[in-house]
Image (cartoon, rainbow, N blue to C red):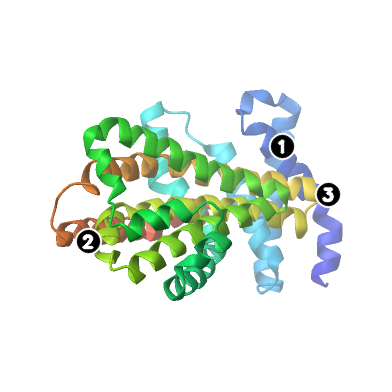
Amino acid sequence: MSPETFIARKRTDWERLNALLVRAGAGLDTLSAAELIEMGRLYRQATSDLAVARRDFPRHQLAAYLNDLVARSHGAIYRNAGPRPATMLTFFSSVFPQAFRATWPATLAAFLMFLIPALAAFIVTFRDPTLAGALLPGSEPVIEQIQAGEEWWLTINDSPAAASAQIMTNNIGVAIRAFAGGITLGIYTFWVLVTNGLLIGVVAGAAQRFGFAGNLWGFVAAHGVIELSIIFIAGGAGLQLGWSILRPGLLSRRAALVVAARRAVLLLLGVVPLFIIAGLIEGFISPANLPLWIKLTVAAGSGIALAAYLTWPGANAMRDEG
């Protein structure tokens, strides 16, 4: 039997199970007794279908799809309605890292959409700073400040707590725009990533041209790793929303969008603590008169800690249960 024949025979049941899982996301008590029995039956059947797919079509995308469906079914049916602290601990220790690992290609795509314009803007601005305005309209005042050697971020020291709150708000705004842009087939997400990349590239290129690079990186280094990671993860979440509409795979576009949105929301919720960490670092450490090596140590330490957290083997726990 071919994968296409197998899919044609089973697809209706899989889509019905997915629909029940979406409704059960608000709690199993939202389903009727008959629907609970039906979900249990469909879950057992999907588990059997997964075994067949792994045996007969191991390289087909069907196996990955069924693995995800079975894992989500298992979590919905057997989840522990324990106290909230345990739920939060499970989310940040397992659910969020697993969601990141499952969607890392989208995060990588977001990173490249940021990096390539940033590098291009850096080269252009370094060679001719007068072109900064053409690359990013409205950037001329920043270039003038860099040329004059003004360290505008030092005003943060006047009220670090207020500045930290404002920075968190700004970071949240950028991340939400990158995430929500996915509903435009990822076009707006692409625009957010590109414009932020151009901004960094223009500022860095001008700083390098006018001998201001040491000052700039002395401010940016400490918080940059966490702050950019937030943008990339949120951007990746938005891109996968757009991709689910363009390429729904085995699902209908509506069902594929629901599945992608579920993962995207997990990613957005997961970066909430990163907003706080980035804001605190940028408000209290980045503008402080500290040796550059201390700020670089903060950057390296936060980056290594974040990478270890997101790629820790425990992140696969939920998937292994499926």
Return the residue nearer the eye: 252 or 151: 151
In which quadrant of the rendered image does the N terminus lie? bottom right
Residue drawn at the location 76% of the way across and 58% of the way down: 246
Amino acid tagged 3: Thr
Return the residue nearer the eye: 155 or 314: 155
User: Total number of numbered labels?
Assistant: 3
Amino acid tagged 1: Leu
Residue 4, percent from left and from top: 84, 67
Amino acid tagged 2: Leu
Residue 308, percent from left and from top: 33, 60
Q: Is residue 113 left or right of residue 210?
A: right
Residue 81, percent from left and from top: 48, 29
Disc 3 versus disc 1: distance between alpha carbons? 12 Å
The residue identified by callout 2 is 296
Q: Is residue 124 visible?
A: yes
Q: Secondary structure at mark 3?
A: helix
- Give the mark nearer the N terminus: 2 vs 3: 3
Q: Is residue 98 visible?
A: no
- Give the mark nearer the N terminus: 2 vs 1: 1
Question: Tag 1: Cα neighbours inside 10 Å, few (<14), some, or many (≥20)?
Answer: many
The residue identified by callout 3 is 12
Disc 2 versus disc 3: distance between alpha carbons? 54 Å
- Name the quadrant containing residue 31: top right
The correct choice, above or below, for 24 with respect to 246 in the image is above
Q: Secondary structure at mark 2?
A: helix
